[in-house]
Amino acid sequence: MKRIVVAVLAIAFAASAMAQDKPKDEPKKPTRGDRFKTIIQDWQKAQEPLRKEFVELKTDEEREAFIAKLPPRFAPFAEAAVKLAEEDLKDPAAFEALMFAMMAAQSEKAAELMAASQQEHRQFQTIVMMLGGQGENNPAAEKLLKLTHEKAAKKDLRGAAAFSLAQMYYKKSEAAGAKEPEKLLKQAEQMAASVEKDFADVNTPDGSLKDSAGKLLFEIRNLAVGKTAPEVVSEDLEGKEAKLSNYRGKVVVLDIWATWCGPCRAMIPHEREMVEKLKDKPFALISISADEEKKDLKDFLEKEKMPWTHWWEGRKPKGILKDWNVQFFPTIYVIDHKGVIRHKGLRGKKLEEAVEKLVKEAEAEKKS
């Protein structure tokens, strides 16, 4: 979400900077772009005490609760932005103003206006495609996607919105505390299947919607929490074949990473502690490297102590990176001793707590 807002604001500032100045001796009347820039400046000032408050929070739960309360706090700025856009929906500033209101304050009115008036904007489809991966907790973003899917005149926009809705439902189904996750997962599967069937000929900067929907369907049907993990065949540091199925009976954390990934490297100290703590337990941490050259991985491991299992995947045309549609690093899967995916995307303390619980389950079953 933050990345979208930042991008939108950058566009707005650029638009304002491009406004032609009138002669110096004639007072300049602020454009809507200028006025929107003022709204953003006021919004940024209002965030200063909030940033300080956020930094002082101690737990992830406190931070998540704090973030959830931000949209109502930003509502006055969103209302001002919507009112500005309504003056002239064809003004270039209207798109940026409505996007800001929708993302910063979850304004559903802004979403309705965007769907009704901004579909010809050159960045509309890009925004629609981005929302599937970044707007899953924003009801305004979902409304924009639904309206676009149902009412857009252009097939490519309807298809893009349908694909983003499928992504959104899938992400929502796996969020902590999700309501009716099975229903959401079913919605995601149905929507992705409709994209694969009805919008197969639509192309996007990321490729055809048919291919994208096919990859998403594989995730939904095989990699969702509760599914048995598919077999993974990779290679170890000596070039020997390595299989995930060989670890059945152990709780497995699959950490798909790369040595150049900052967030991945940040996990290493805690991973070391977790591995040491569970060294005599039915547990395995498997780091699967996406580095292009195996030498880069080996050189890194000579300098950085990472005493657990390492596989190298590189950039193979087939393998877990392609088959599992890995789009970011690190990608984390927590798999129980029966081979069932139980968690995804956990890090730090939450990861350790989840693993310890699953290890106890494995030990209890072994004793019984």
Image: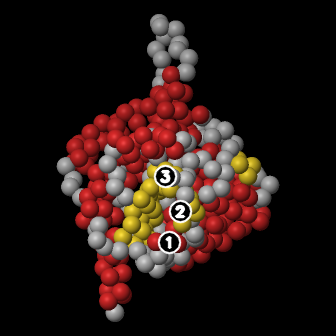
**Identity, as a three-letter code, of the amino acid under mark 1:** Asn
On screen, residue 26 versus residue 128, left or right, reads left
**Identity, as a three-letter code, of the amino acid under mark 2:** Ala
CA distance separating discs 3 and 2: 10 Å
CA distance separating discs 1 and 3: 17 Å
Residue 118 in view: no
Residue at 54% x, 41% y: name it: 293
Dot 3: element:
loop
Residue 117 to residue 9: above or below:
below
**Identity, as a three-letter code, of the amino acid under mark 3:** Leu
* Callout 3–callout 2 Cβ contact below 8 Å: no
Residue 311 in view: yes
Residue designated by label 3: 237
- Residue at the limit of the structure toward the bottom, as seen here: 368
Dot 2: element:
strand
Residue designated by label 1: 246
